Image (spheres, rainbow, N blue to C red):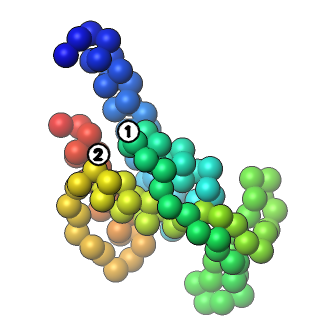
Amino acid sequence: MTKIEALAKARNVKEQKKAVEMLYQLDHAFIGKEGVEQLTKPFGFIGTTYLAKANPEDFKGLSLHDAEGNAVSEMDGQDASKTAMEICQHLGIEFQEMYGRGSQLRVCAARILEHISK
């Protein structure tokens, strides 16, 4: 590996670790389309999104807000735990499936960190 390749790999790993740190902070969060792209691009792909409809009046319903914090009725994006699982799947990382979204996100984020820290 040349010095330039080693530097590029180190920069990429740094960007990946930053993305995983951000994922840890998004526990139980819905991420907008731009956020999904920002989190998955360092891993060499763009994660999937869908058009979600807000339903904050339901028990454990989804509340959606734009970048300024204003409530919106629908938004393109993805659940943070699903994004973490997609990163694992893209990298070929095995992970334990969990029932809770927060638990799933933490398990996947930990496995991603293990993988990129090798």
Residue with the mark numbered 2? 113
The kind of residue on which mark 1 rests is: Lys
104 or 6: which is nearer to us?
A: 6
Point out residue 12 in the picture as x, y percentages from the top left corner: 37, 30
Point out residue 18 in the picture as x, y percentages from the top left corner: 44, 38
The residue at the point 78 percent across, 69 percent down is 72
Q: Is residue 110 visible?
A: no
Residue with the mark numbered 1? 17
Disc on the earlier residue, 2 or 1: 1
User: In this image, 95 relative to 79: left or right?
Assistant: left
Say which element carries label 2. Answer: helix
Q: Is residue 11 visible?
A: yes
Crowd around label 1: few <14 · some 14–19 · many ≥20 (10 Å): some
The residue at the point 26 percent across, 9 percent down is 3
User: In this image, 27 relative to 60: left or right?
Assistant: left
- Quarter of the image for residue 32 reads bottom right
Q: Is 91 situated above or below 66?
A: above
Say which element carries label 1. Answer: helix
Verify CB contact (< 8 Å) between mark 2 and mark 1: yes
Q: How many marks do you count on the picture?
A: 2
The quadrant in which the C terminus is found is: top left
The residue at the point 27 percent across, 73 percent down is 97
Point out residue 41 in the picture as x, y percentages from the top left corner: 47, 43
The quadrant in which the N terminus is found is: top left
The kind of residue on which mark 2 rests is: Leu
Crowd around label 2: few <14 · some 14–19 · many ≥20 (10 Å): some
User: In this image, 115 relative to 35: left or right?
Assistant: left
Point out residue 40 in the picture as x, y percentages from the top left corner: 45, 48
User: In this image, 65 relative to 115: left or right?
Assistant: right
Q: Marks 2 and 1, how far apart in space?
A: 7 Å
What label does residue 27 carry, if any? Answer: none
